[in-house]
Amino acid sequence: MKNLLLTLSVVLLSVVAAFSQYEYSRQESLPCLDKNFTIVVHFVKDTSGNVNITEQNVQELIDTLNVYFEPICASFSICDFQVIDNYQYDTPKNENEFQQMINQYNEEYRINLYFSDLVSFSNDAAGFATNAGVTMTHDGGIVAEIGYVLGFPKGLPHLFGHYFGLLDTWEGNGIELVNGDNCTVAGDLICDTPSDPYIPGDTLLLYINPNICRFWYRSRRDANGEYYRTDVSNIMSYYPESCKCGFSHGQYVRMANTYLSAPFKLW
Ligand SMILES: [Zn+2]
């Protein structure tokens, strides 16, 4: 009897140990950057010479941004506000014009954040960001579309996601398999963000019941014939802003590693 009890206890302890190991690996702690980034804010004047956003508005957007980056111990502070008179850059028409603007006005070793009234060349409604711009000392930047980010403050963390090396969850439009087999080489290259079949320009109603933020998972299937189970709450998706919650663990790891692998660090 004693032996039986002993055996049972050993089995029980091994099971507990196995489960703790599993939980531990699933909830592996995130890298901590312990870094405060400084942002130069550039306001672009419109054709009437007005700037359609205030310093207070921007500070509130940065306060929201800081909440989303806290899990990797990154924060952002505004070090300067500048104004650009050339209204051509209030409506940059293509990536080339965006690049011209940042070549002309960027301050080195800072995050340069521009506010314009219309950013029509980007798939992102919130604006455009240089992918992995945080690894560049003077060639990267972010331009936010004023009306959009004022209405939807989660638009700015989305742009910063790109700036820290993330792709949109719909990249590849569903070529990432539902079972995750090709998740390291397809889609957004992140394995804890389920495959997202969205195609930019499509009406969202094809994909989601917006009233309850639920994916119509029976609407589309992947190459294996499996129904998509897309996460509509991911901040790097194109589903309604009201459905969005935040970044996934894998996205945080990638953002932190993008910064940590940069050959030069921003101030
Ligand atoms: Zn995007």
Image (cartoon, grey):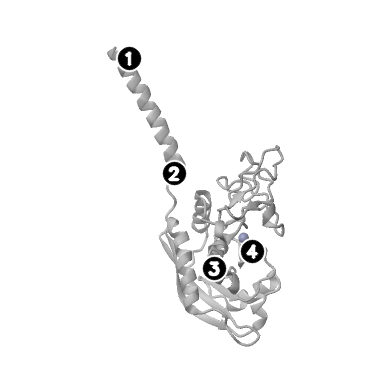
Quarter of image, res 147: bottom right
Is label 1 or label 2 in front? 1
**130 versus 43 height, above or below:** above
Residue position marked by numbered label 2 in the rendering = 27
The mark that comes first in sequence, 3 or 4, is: 4
Residue for point 53% across, 67% down: 153
The mark that comes first in sequence, 1 or 2, is: 1
Residue found farthest to the left: 2
Quarter of image, res 10: top left
The mark that comes first in sequence, 3 or 2, is: 2
- The amino acid pointed to by label 2 is Gln
Is label 3 or label 1 in front? 1
Q: Residues within 10 Å of mark 1 (few under 14, many from 20)?
A: few
Which label belongs to residue 137? 3
Q: CA distance from mark 1 to mark 4?
A: 63 Å
Q: CA distance from mark 3 to mark 2?
A: 33 Å
Residue position marked by numbered label 4 in the rendering = 124
For label 4, being within 8 Å of ligand 1 is answered yes
- 80 on left or right of 92: left
Residue for point 45% across, 68% down: 63
The mark that comes first in sequence, 3 or 1, is: 1
